[in-house]
Amino acid sequence: MKYKFVALLIFCILFSCDIRKADSTKYSILKEQDRASLKDELLEDRFTNLLPELMDKANIDMWLLISREYNEDPILKTMLPATWLNARRRTIIIFYRNKEKNTLERLAVARYDFGKSIKSAWDKEKEPNQWKALAEIIKKRNPKSIGINMSKHFALADGLVKTDYDELVENLPIELSDKLISAEKLGIAWIETRTEKELALFRDLVKITHDIIDETFSEKTIISGETTTEDLVWYLRQKVTDLGLETWFHPTIDVQRNNEALKSHIESFSKGKDEKIIQKGDLLHCDFGITYIGLNTDCQQHAYILKDDETEVPQFLKDAFKKGNRVQDILTSTMKSGLTGNEILAQSLSQGKEEGLLPSIYTHPLGKYGHSTGTTIGMWDSQNGVPFNGDYPLQKNTAYAIELNTTVFIKEWNKDIRIMLEEAGFFGDDTFEYVNERQTAIKSIKIN
């Protein structure tokens, strides 16, 4: 027991020393000031070239967002300039779209300019009451509709808190409060739509994610019979921190091996992972994602620890992995603009089962948030469809975590295993592509 503790201590020290040498340039990670510049550039591009189109499509000519410091609307949070880590006091933003003049006004009913993209339109010395100043600005423009972020089924589009809603209604004249409508579709579109500039950044971000997984699943980090799955989990967390990045969820590492029964879905998804000492002959699996300049990744990949007499991954595991890739192909080829998530789910599962596979699909929108908003294609415990969120149609220029698994019987182990995969994908003009490739073969790790 004492030896094991000392070995683990040495292992952690070696990890720590190695991590401190992490070179962000190796991963093409920008310095903080450059990140800020890029973030503001991406945001200005979205305001200028994307938002007018989204407002027209949603048939909303005024969009009103209201937040208070540390209690930000999830949508407004994606609009914060790089030097604003939170809203300030009560921050109110107005977007007014005049389609006939092809203009989009951006106004902040706040004491401060909202970064460089939105100018303050409130002179507190002339009108001390912020709500009255807001009402006057709206009245002057006389919009046909006023979109506010309220949604029963899409949490990220439901950011207007009750207190602010009540005060808004109390301070607007009836002729204006009668124009208040849900901006649900506009809010979802803002969150889920990716621009060309964002997609370029996204490709880099997914590549960084893959590189970190490759380093974690390697001879550099794993000592057979000593390294545990929790060691690798915290290696991932520390690596992310040392690179100046963030992770939006706690990663997991789990093991499948020939002398242990396959866990049920509920054990795999809803319960914590058991810590295990990694051994030769283990099939490893990770679930890992990072956050960088307002975008998020979500990735699951597999690795195999070669036995002493093996030089490559056993053929039966290679064959099983191909079945996981096949489920991916079925799903992504079924994704068509206008189909709902539930329709895509049903078609994909049906085809997979016709081909003799045992698929489970739980693909979710990905981008501004990890579990983002938009088309939901199944959940691990909702394989017959997802009410409301699954009824939302697939839109163009959106990104997804293509997350799924297939169960495969391995006669060599006399048991089922589960090939669990997740990769960032982009649905463009009725075409699908992986943001930065996908895993097509199990990683092999040779340890002396």
Image: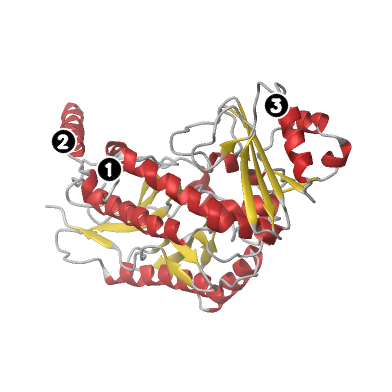
Residue 130, labelled with which disc?
Answer: 3
Q: Which residue is mark 1?
A: 277
* Numbered disc in front, either 3 or 2: 3
Return the disc, 3 or 1, that comes first in the chain's sequence: 3
- Quadrant position of residue 299: bottom left
How did the renderer colour the structure? Answer: secondary structure
Vertical side of 270 occupied by 284: above or below: below
The answer to whether residue 382 of the structure is visible from this angle is: no
Residue located 61% across and 73% down the image: 347
Q: Secondary structure at mark 2?
A: helix
Pick the residue in front: 386 or 207: 207
Q: Looking at the image, is 340 positioned above or below residue 69?
A: below
Per the model, the C-alpha gap separating discs 3 and 1 is 60 Å
Residue position for label 2: 14
Asked if residue 53 lies left or right of residue 177, the reply is: left
Q: Residue at x 54, y 36 (%)?
A: 114
| Residue 408 visible at all | yes
Toward the bottom, the furthest residue is 355
Percent across and percent down for residue 274 are: 39, 41
The extreme left residue here reads 448
Q: Are the residues tagged 3 and 2 within 8 Å (C-beta)? A: no
Amino acid type, label 3: Gln
Query: In the structure shown, which secondary structural element does the residue marked by tag 3 occupy?
Result: helix
